[in-house]
Amino acid sequence: MRIIENSVVSLNYILKNDNTGEKIEETTQNNPLVFLFGAQAMIPEFEQQLEGKQKGDTAAFSIKAENAYGIHEQDQVAMIPANIFHGEDGKVDTEFFYIGAMVPMSDNEGNHLRGKILEITNDHIKMDFNHPLAGTDLHFSVEVLDVREATQDEIDHGHVHGEHGHHH
């Protein structure tokens, strides 16, 4: 079966920074990526590169940052008053809040965000709310492990059920 809309795709991939060659992420035979093709859960250009492939096919392709997780937007970097992060002792809890930590937050409208701590001072914490891969050109090497028709239940829910997928 070829990869088409509403097919369940299992694949292994190696993701690298297209400019530096640095490995970002890699799946394994025991933990492949399994997703419902066409459910808009993946980068659109990633799916375009896979359409029509079948079990056993391999591919290597690059996706520019603006077509992946976007460019790095400076307006997504914020200075937040440090007292928001103070524990009962009136100080920043460095066990949870340290440079490089990814911290779940919410904005004034209640939207959930994740921010990376860039800097900590007595007065503020500088956080970056861009996607961690924003501004990064991506390179994928993929191997299609399996392709099958999605069940109606999977199509209705918009995700894969069963092994390596979502379990209800």
Image: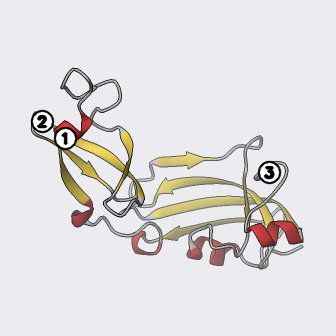
Q: Nearer the viewer, residue 17 or 10?
A: 10
Residue 160 lies, with reference to residue 95, above or below; the image says below
The quadrant holding residue 42 is: bottom right
106 sits to left or right of 84: right
**Residue 36, position in %: x, y?**
74, 67
Q: Residues within 10 Å of mark 1 (few under 14, many from 20)?
A: some
Residue type marked 1: Glu
The CA distance from mark 1 to mark 2 is: 7 Å
Q: Nearer the viewer, residue 41 or 13?
A: 41
The quarter of the rendered structure image containing the N terminus is: bottom right
Q: Earlier in the sequence, mark 2 or mark 3?
A: 2
Give the colouring mode of the picture: secondary structure
Residue named by callout 3: 168
85 sits to left or right of 142: left
Residue type marked 3: His
Residue named by callout 2: 121
The quadrant holding residue 146 is: bottom right
